[in-house]
Image (cartoon, helix red, strand yellow):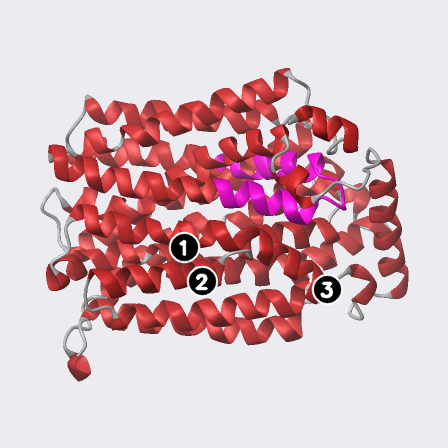
Amino acid sequence: MLFPAKHAMAERDTLEARTMRQVALRIVPFLTICYFISFVDRVNLGFAALQMIGDLRLSATVFGLGGGLFFVSYFLCEVPSNLLLEKFGARRWIARIMITWGFLAGAMALVKGPHSFYAIRLLLGAAEAGFFPGVILYLSYWFPAEYRARIIGWFTVAIPVSSFLGSPISAALLGINGWRGLRGWQWMFILEGAPAVLLGLACLVVLSDRPADAKWLAADRRNWLVSKLDAEARRARPVGRLSVWQILWNKQVLALSVVLAGSTAVSSGLQLWQPQIIKSYGLTNLQTGLLNSIPFALAAMIMVWWGARSDQSGERIWHASVPLMLTAFSLAAALLFDSLFSTIVILCLAVIGIYAGKGPVWAVSTEFLSTSTAAAGLAQINALSNLAGFGTIYLVGFIKDATGRFSLALLPLVALAGAAALTMLLIGRAEMPGAIPDDKAAVASR
């Protein structure tokens, strides 16, 4: 639920409830679908690998390097992309991101060997950079702080749902093998890249840049929302003229980047390698796709409930750190258990932990950053956390080649999730303030 159940009857006829319900229904489902397609295009490489590695004769190390290079260009373009979003407006910039990544996702069908694989993955990362932090920034334009964990939870549910629905779909598309001379993995990239282009065009119609521009909101609702968000911005700690450099290297921004890395980078590592881990037990592509979807189905349900629980209680730190602890301990258990059943249970617990904490962590981030620092700060947090995804994806492949065991290859993910949980607890102990401090404090914090 977007609103606490115990207040639902009382709020039904209030201006706030009607306004927030209309805004949520207009924006959140559409952006969730966009993010769903984004993640299908990002993680379908894991299923393409079931044919692609053999066709192109790629080692696990080469595949891990190519998969991880996406996050290098993603990192380099993330902050500039979010700053350009503020300059050109969210509607146009989100549309641009989706259209370019859709074409490049389809272009993965053109890969012929390691070098073209590396090149297109780099271009794809640059094209998609800025989408997630841009949408998080965009949601902060529309939703007051007390709604954000559950709203972000609803939006980010697209990540596990993309793997839940995308796994069997991608596995099935691999069966379109030989039609018009293309392999199944090539058709999968083409058919799963096209929706991003269409949704990018739809952004120009569906989205409005700010509440003040929303002609689809009645005047009283629009005025209430603008006033509410303006009042919230004025209550935040005043911010001086901070440079982008000061924002990017503020110690709290860096700490939140470590926390997000424990979720985002671990997620990236699992999403790319999980299909191969499951198939290593001798399963067919379709069986692999169906089993791969189970952890994400459970995570999708739990992350929405967990985000709403965080909003209702007002507690963020433990709601963010406990799921990360669950991920670390469950993946470490892969060293002790090696059956297919135990592997699926381990993956279920790990994936639940990854996604349950996303809403609370992003809520902490948006509450911490003031209006004038949000664009650069959110982009930096997301960029650094995704850059760690390069390391996790590459290391899993490298360790798998070196040892022949996926259980040992998962140890970098264990370490990162554990470090993220500890960092979140330290943030809570330090009682992080509600906004980036002014110039002098910002300089001191570095």
> Tag 1, which secondary structure?
helix
Alpha carbons under labels 2 and 3: distance apart: 22 Å
3 or 1: tag closer to the N-terminus: 1
Instruction: Indicate whether 385 appears above or below 287.
Output: above
2 or 3: tag closer to the N-terminus: 2
Query: Is residue 120 inside the magenta stretch?
Result: no
Alpha carbons under labels 1 and 2: distance apart: 7 Å
Give the amino acid at mark 1: Ser
In the image, 90: left or right of 437? left
Mark 1 surroundings: few (<14), some (14-19) or many (≥20) residues within 10 A: many
Q: Quadrant of residue 165?
A: bottom left
Instruction: Indicate whether 107 appears above or below 295.
Output: below
Query: Is residue 363 inside the magenta stretch?
Result: yes
> Tag 3, which secondary structure?
loop
Which disc number belongs to residue 162?
Answer: 1
Quadrant that contains the N terminus: top right
Q: Quadrant of residue 175?
A: bottom left
Which disc number belongs to residue 209?
Answer: 3
For mark 2, what is the residue?
37
Q: Residue at x 81, y 42 (%)?
A: 10
Give the amino acid at mark 3: Asp
Alpha carbons under labels 3 and 1: distance apart: 26 Å
> Is the residue under label 1 in contact with that under label 3 (CB below 8 Å)?
no
